[in-house]
Image (spheres, rainbow, N blue to C red):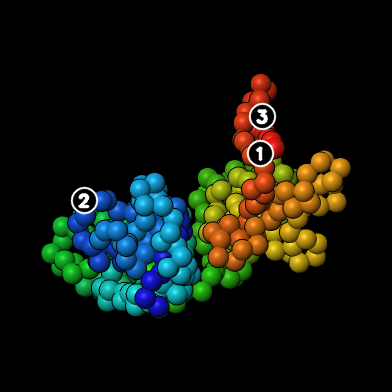
Amino acid sequence: MQNWYIKITEENRDELVKWWEDKVGKSDYGAPKINQYLMSENPEDDSYYWSQQDTDKYGLDWKQNYELITLEQFRKITQMKHPEKWYIVATEENFNELNAWRKTVAESCHNGFSIGNPLLSKHVGDNSYYYGASVDRLRSDSSYNDYQEITLEQFRQITSLKPMSETTAIQISRNLLNDYYEASTNSQKEYLSEHFKLNGWTTIGAIRGLYELACDGWKPTIKANHPDCFEPESKEFNFENYVAKNSKCILKANANELGLGYDFIQIRVDKYSDYYHKGFYLDGEYNWELVTDNKNIIVLVPTKK
């Protein structure tokens, strides 16, 4: 595939920008941003991505000659090679995932890995698989000059780590365990006593079970405290099943009564669109205006051309 492009998202940006940096190096354009498009080659310059400024200047004709690809296709096309020696800094968000892998390869006597420590492909002096100081110390340590920082996505690819199972062990803080216990009903206290140890050790499944038992007010708190224990929730809608069962014209039955064409608003079904099965198409036969009324409510207003 010679001409391709891929939309930059919050989830893939680190990986895409890494390829861009290897390709471009330092650039006056700056690194591409979320919602812009990384591409095999910008037809107008050597930036390797397309921005809104390009659209304003050159228009949208470039998409006709480029094919939209997935992240998997991008990886195959670019054949990105992962570094043999690498590190990734442990954060509150990724610690459980990183430590779960570390426990499968490290000696059992090394239990000091904590948030802020860099996880390593291999420690130069022992079998701990982590650096027991800050990432700044690591970067200034000559023993690790040839180690490269990787993203969480790269870590998953390198280690072939599968999502954590129900039985994966994790540890929460004693203070947090006390908070859960104090706020619990009698039946919830019994559950905590059965599935949580006093030092905070428990499992992914136990956290999920606690979530199911919790009242509506505590459910968001539990998810926020343990994001790695739950599948991420997409903010986008997927209307594919609705289209298959009904029609892309979501208000078809009422269109004539409204005095509009039956397809005046419909689900986007063009599979080459960025918003395929995610957004609504507004018929070009009308003028459309998105306004805020006097009660600060957003209103979509159609008018005749």
Q: Position of residue 21 (x, y in %)?
A: 26, 62
Q: Secondary structure at mark 2?
A: loop
Q: Find disc 2 in the rendering and name its residue.
A: 28
Quarter of the figure that contains the C terminus: top right
Give the residue type at disc 1. Answer: Lys
Q: Position of residue 38 (x, y in %)?
A: 37, 61
**Residue 193 located left or right of residue 117:** right
Identity of the residue drawn at 74% across and 62% down: 243
Give the residue type at disc 3. Answer: Ile
Return the disc, 2 or 1, that comes first in the chain's sequence. 2
Q: Nearer the viewer, residue 24 or 63?
A: 63
Identity of the residue drawn at 21% across and 61% down: 25
Q: Nearer the viewer, residue 1 or 256?
A: 256
Give the residue type at disc 2. Answer: Asp
Return the disc, 3 or 2, that comes first in the chain's sequence. 2
Q: CA distance from mark 3 to mark 2?
A: 41 Å
Q: Find disc 1 in the rendering and name its residue.
A: 305
